[in-house]
Amino acid sequence: MADLAELAGVSKITVSRALSESTLVNPETRERVQALARKHGYKLNVSARNLRLRRSHTVAVIVEMKPSSGRTMWDPYPLSLLGGISQELTSAGYSVLLTTRQDAVNAAVQAADGLILLGQGVRQDAVRLYDKVGLPMVVWGAAGQGGDNHIVVGSDNRQGGVSVAERFLSIGRRHPVFIGNPDHPEMAQRLFGFVDELAGHGIKPLLLRRTDFTLESGVDAVRSLSERKVRFDSIFACSDLLAMGAIRALVELGHSVPNDVSVIGYDDTPLGASFLPPLSTVRQNWQEGGVLLARKVLALIHGQPVQSQMMASTLVVRST
Amino acid sequence: MADLAELAGVSKITVSRALSESTLVNPETRERVQALARKHGYKLNVSARNLRLRRSHTVAVIVEMKPSSGRTMWDPYPLSLLGGISQELTSAGYSVLLTTRQDAVNAAVQAADGLILLGQGVRQDAVRLYDKVGLPMVVWGAAGQGGDNHIVVGSDNRQGGVSVAERFLSIGRRHPVFIGNPDHPEMAQRLFGFVDELAGHGIKPLLLRRTDFTLESGVDAVRSLSERKVRFDSIFACSDLLAMGAIRALVELGHSVPNDVSVIGYDDTPLGASFLPPLSTVRQNWQEGGVLLARKVLALIHGQPVQSQMMASTLVVRST
DNA sequence: CGATATCTTGATATCGATATCATTCACTTC
DNA sequence: GAAGTGAATGATATCGATATCAAGATATCG
């Protein structure tokens, strides 16, 4: 910048102002300086600016990558979320610092202006750990999670559960089963919505706990139902994979889907749509979720009032 | 740091040295300063250090997110790669700056110490664009891509093709078909390996070009074979989804897999393993790939000699 | 015409760390 | 006892940007 100043015959500070589009400089001077900057390939030194401005223009995204329970790195949704986040933050001039969750809080994370926590129903210990850092923080997850002292963005899992219940009721199903993990905050919300809506019609679903969200787990769940001679006519599975596994098992056992048993999954993965028969499911818009997460942190960083928000989820009825 | 200096009764510079484990300070003093730092929750100002040290301790990861052709954000592999990268870089004290590819090179990217380019066979324009930045750069992709003036890490797609060919030959298949997109550099390598190995036995496979890597595309490919009354006894599909689609179509057409036709996919997605019948496929270790990418950039940054490297891919024989 | 307002530019200090060179002090060695 | 050695610490300058305050040039007004 000093070099540019010399070239343009002005002072450093004028160069700085010219490049930051300040109104304090003569438009003519500004143009001249900017032209010189382009010509000589001037690059702003981000560290210097951040140092002086006492902010990093960076938001850290912490991804929970616990390699268990089948739903983590292999799941495509974190990437969609990341895409939305990245898109929104970069267009606002912020950088995205990607970190995987660790026990110790990274020095680079502490230097960020804000935090976004992603993961499979981020657990409380993670939230508490990063809460201590005292940075603006937004969490992806279920509403009400963690005492409302931080902002949560997520899709409306409760409503997802409700709409599945409504669908089952509307087609006359009376013996629904829920497959999923109630300890998982997001899935718990789905369960609550499902149960509450059904309760309004005097129906109590059977809860089948499964912590693995794999196809095998779905197969296994339905087999266990069959072995226990449980009567059921509809299944709400908390992931598309579970649903597909359930359908496979149903077919093996000689049941017809959807004639004998209706099955609805969750997530609207591309595979579900291609499945035979095409899977009915609940769709969440992750890309949009990422954008929302980013907007919330930015608002927090700029000291604006922010509220948690749940995005609507939509029931996609296909053939099951 | 100045405050710490006062508290400890030493100078700033001594504090700096104590915290960076320099041997220039008395071990006793070092301990005392470090204890004080911990007690008062001192945090290093990264910007200041980076400014003084003239490096950013940051590697930018540029992800190609072209939302087309079915294989992008919805594909889980970028996340695995990212996981490996993130793990390796953070443990080396570097930060991961996540960016999605854009036409203009981001200012933050220019400030990075190194670049990693990810994407579905990163195209040459992207490589050239970022090459101009003049930073140490490593690209994920196919070997030899782009004139060898930059480092490439990828799985050995050629070898993958060879091993599929070997398998087909070993079980007596004589009329193989290749389904994929030869314009895609990585897939082209698979094709070359496949063709070369077969040629050694006087066999020439049929090439079926498909640019979409979806299940439907696989279905469609096999149907077109059938309509054209082509004689074939084995299919090498360039993605698991294609393979599954192909198998579905084969079954619909009354062929038995693997009795009439052998099918081998690529990527070893979790779904392939759960497919009925369980899918034979070629596995790539993405996590490891990420680690490798990270190591190469770090080496480049530190001025060490670096070479492109292809990781072995392994044929996983299941039931198809 | 003098006084004030406006526009444009500059001098200086500062953000928080580290490299370099200088200094102090205790101790060894002949 | 003088000179030399090494360990520990400090003073100062510096990285590259921007905020603050000051000042010169020009325009506007009664």
Image: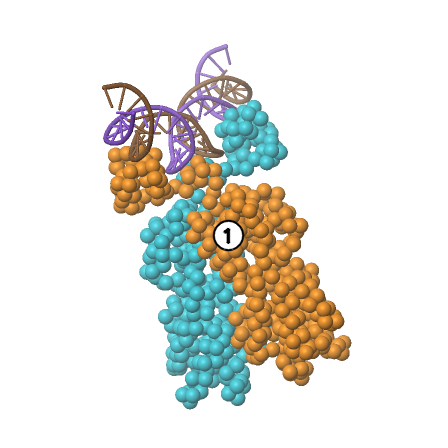
Chain colours: A cyan, B orange, C purple, D brown
Location of mark 1 (residue): B295
Question: Can residue A22 be seen?
Answer: yes
**Residue under the point 44% across and 54% down:** A99
User: Residue B170, image x and y in percent?
Assistant: 65, 76
| Residue in the foreground of this view, choosing between B18 and B241 | B18
| Residue in the foreground of this view, choosing between D13 and A301 | D13
Residue B309 sits in quarter: bottom right
Characterize the local packing of mark 1: few (<14), some (14-19) or many (20 or more) Cα atoms within 10 angstroms.
Answer: some
Circle 1: element type: helix
| In the image: residue D22, left or right of residue B313 | left
Q: Amino acid at mark 1?
A: Arg
The answer to whether D29 is drawn above or below residue A109 in the figure is above
**Residue under the point 70% across and 66% down:** B196
| In the image: residue A282, left or right of residue B66 | left
Query: Which of the image's four quarters has the N terminus of chain B?
Result: top left
User: Residue A221, image x and y in percent?
Assistant: 44, 80
**Residue under the point 48% across and 77% down:** A216
The answer to whether B131 is drawn above or below residue A2 in the figure is below
